[in-house]
Amino acid sequence: MSAPHKGSGRSKARSAARLGAVQALYQRHMEKTALARLLDEFHQHRLGKEIEDDQYADAEIDFFDDVVSGVVAREDEIDGLLTAKLAQGWTLARLDKTMLQILRCGAYELVARADVPVGTAISEYVDVAHAFFDEREAKFVNGVLDAVAKDVRA
C-alpha cells in the first residue's frame, strides 16, 4: 500500500525504493539480518515482485542500496540528529519501529544525498508514513525531518 505518485517512472522507482528501504531496515531491526543478505533478499524476492497479489513497483535498485547501506553505516550519526529533534523525555527507543526507520531513511537522504531536494526527501517520507500511519504521525515525520533539514542543509 502506498500513496499514488504523479510524475516520471524514475520518481515512482525512487518512491518504491524508499518504501523498500524502510521495510528492509525494519526487517534488519527485528531479525538482525546481515546487510548483504538483506539487500540480496530484497533484490531477489521483494523489489518489483508480486507478493500475495500485491504488485510491488519496480524500485531503483542503486538508490535502495544506497539508502539502506547508508542508514546502516551512519546509524549513530543519524540517530543523534533525530534524538536532538524529539520532544524532551522522548527517545528513539520509544518510537514505533516502522516510524524509526522512516525517520532514519529521511534523515539519511537529507545528510548524504545532496542530489535530492529537501522538499522531495521530506514529502516522500511523509508519503511513506501515510502508508503505515494516520495524519498525526505523517505530520510528526514532516516536523522532525524539517528540523533535521534546517541543521544539515544550511
Image: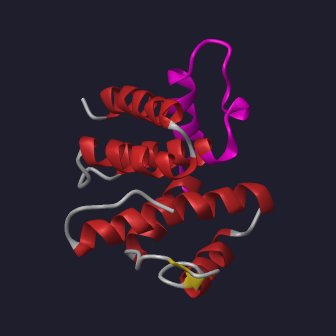
Residue under the image location 41 percent in, 43 percent down: 126
Q: Is residue 81 left or right of residue 35?
A: left
Q: Quadrant of residue 150?
A: top left
Which residue of the protein is positioned furthest toward the right in this rendering? 31
Measuring from the top left, give residue 21's x and y in whole percent.
Answer: 52, 62
- Closest to the observer, 73 or 136: 136
Measuring from the top left, give residue 117's x and y in whole percent.
Answer: 23, 47
Residue under the image location 70 percent in, 62 percent down: 27
Residue under the image location 46 percent in, 52 percent down: 128
Q: In this view, does 94 lie to the left or right of 144?
A: right
Which residue of the protein is positioned furthest toward the left in this rendering? 7
Vertically, is 96 above or below 116? Answer: above
Vertically, is 70 above or below 79? Answer: below
Question: Is residue 78 found inside the magenta-colored segment of the image?
Answer: yes
Measuring from the top left, give residue 123's x and y in whole percent.
Answer: 33, 44
Question: Is residue 88 found inside the magenta-colored segment of the image?
Answer: yes
Residue under the image location 41 percent in, 49 percent down: 127
Q: Quadrant of residue 110?
A: top left
Q: Quadrant of residue 46?
A: bottom right
Vertically, is 131 above or below 151? Answer: below
Numbered disc total: 0
- Closest to the observer, 137 or 74: 137
Measuring from the top left, give residue 75's x and y in whole percent.
Answer: 58, 46
**Magenta segment, principal secondary structure?**
helix
- Closest to the observer, 54 or 111: 54
Question: Colour scheme used in the picture?
Answer: secondary structure
Which residue of the protein is positioned furthest toward the top in this rendering? 88
Q: In which quarter of the image is the C terminus?
A: top left
Q: Is residue 33 left or right of residue 101?
A: right
Q: In this view, does 154 lie to the left or right of 128?
A: left
Range of magenta residues = 73-98
